[in-house]
Amino acid sequence: MTDPERLSVTIVDGYVDEPAHFGVPPYISTYPRYTAGALVDAGVPRERITYHTIDGLRDDPDRWRDVDEADLMIYLGGMTVPGKYVGGTPAEPDEVRKLAWTASGTSLMGGPVKFGVGDENAGATETERQDLDFDFVAKGDVEAAVHDLVESGLEGFNNRMRDVDEVSRWAQDGAFVVEQHPNHPDHLICELETSRGCAYRCSFCTEPLYGNPSFRPPPTVVSEVDALSSRGVKHFRIGRQADILAYGGDGEAPNPDALRSLYGGIREVAPDLETLHLDNMNPITIVNWPEESREGIRIIAEHNTPGDTAAFGLESADPIVQEENNLNVTAEECFEAVRIVNEEAGWRPGEDTADAPTFGPDAPRRLPKLLPGINLLHGLKGEREETYERNRKFLQRVYDEGYMLRRINIRQVMAFDGTDMSDTGAEIAQDHTKLFKRYKRQIREEIDQPMLERVAPPGTVLPDVHLEYHQDGRTFGRQLGTYPLLVGIPGERDLGRTIDVAVVDHGYRSVTAVPYPLDLNDASMDELTAIPGVGDRTAGDIVVNRPYESVTDADLTTEFDLTQFVTTRSLERAE
């Protein structure tokens, strides 16, 4: 019998991406935190629990010693939606096998990896369940498996799902593990779970495999935030649920009182938080219960931070595809939900909430509080060429009628055992590859760019952009939050810093920005020429005639009002 108090445990985070759960840096998912809490609950001392990300192992080979020497090595990972990532690179199957081979002690694998393993995290692929040479694979909840495995003396466990009381306890007990994340504390955002499961049964989705929605009471989530906040976390996303509006209800109808308790409680225990965003919101909830949904959306927009996104799973605007895949919202219903979110939460800090949605030159220079995002999925049963045109027309209608979308996510299906798409697989997506690529490029050019200009017009201020990498003479960074804008800044700046910027130009899914406020006495030629209307000649004149005592001394005549975001440092400092 292995004594839990003498057990050494290493947790390796290979990252997760599920329909209602995200854990690629700068995010940390619930899995490592709950797993650590389950270990503590089973009697393992906190000081004997080590946590590493897969990128941490790649960066420092000496850390593999913790994998080798642990009595119990736990791998957490699995990607059930396709994606491209900047902050981290999910573990590859060969790396996961290496973990199992390296571990001298008992090895256990869990998380969404239980649904299947693919060669890459890409759309139009099929997956299969693999044990990847681990001693144990948790086919239920990995945190429950870990708890029971330790209590059994590492002999085994029954695959089971944890209950609400357990996860509420483990969420608090495992908060300490965030301090071992390489991004802690400044560049780390914690995914928060309010529920699992879904009342609907879309053909492609793994979330219904967790069953019907099961909700955590508001005080338990608030207590988790309190514990994480005490460990230095300032960024949170309420992302682990299929529909935030259904929180605390019967799984379908909104419960504004529960949302008020949740959001108000979080603000009370973490008054200095810097990010509070969400992820999934079901448009059919808004359509079926419009007044209750409006109230819930107002509560969210009152408490959240700007730039928040409510992901809408439209998936397809084609009624044939909707019927064959059990999709629960029509294009017309989704459009109505887009309108309601824009009206209730499309306001910007510093303006009257009744003015929403607002955009254009007179709008305050901040991102709107909460906007919908649209998910479109291709390769579903019944897809035809007309499907692509129906999707395009839906997006064009949203733009033409004066509403905003924070982002449009276009991807191809991944087929998993246990879902209705498992029989069809990726065949349709693979047959439509050329059509998909042409259509995706058209959406980026005709919809994404003008929509982005509407959401973040020139002069929009983006606070706290974290600088992440260099490319082609520019520095790229993002804010922390849900689907943050990729920001390109002229010149190569020190990475790892956080700066405020102002938007000056737009790509398809990214923006060009300059430091805010931009100092005319110090700005580079590249920064100056990035501003609309400032060409090489004007920029050269600005540089030659420096220093300036004030912006008006520069006597700038441009098509863009530079006074929105430029300044001049004092002459003493400029010298």
Image: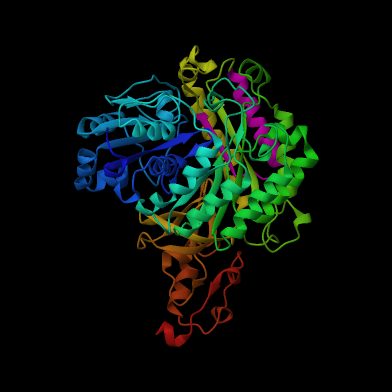
Q: Quadrant of residue 258?
A: top right
Point out residue 535 in the picture as x, y percentages from the top left corner: 49, 64
Say which quadrant the C terminus sits in: bottom left
In the figure, 243 relative to 518: above or below? above
Point out residue 439 in the picture as x, y percentages from the top left corner: 54, 29
In the figure, 114 relative to 371: above or below? above
Is residue 283 toward the left or the right of residue 133 in the image? right
Q: Quadrant of residue 61?
A: top left
**Residue name at image x 25 percent, y 47 percent:** 59
In the figure, 471 relative to 550: above or below? above
Task: Between residue 228 and residue 392, name the one nearer to us.
Answer: 228
Point out residue 31 in the picture as x, y percentages from the top left corner: 43, 39
Q: Is residue 168 visible?
A: yes
Task: Between residue 325 and residue 270, name the one nearer to us.
Answer: 270
**Residue name at image x 74 percent, y 48 percent:** 344
In magenta stretch: residue 44: no
Residue stretch rendered in magenta on the structure: 384-411
Point out residue 119 in the picture as x, y percentages from the top left corner: 34, 25
Q: Quadrant of residue 29?
A: top left
In the figure, 302 relative to 145: above or below? below
Q: Is residue 454 visible?
A: no
In magenta stretch: residue 407: yes
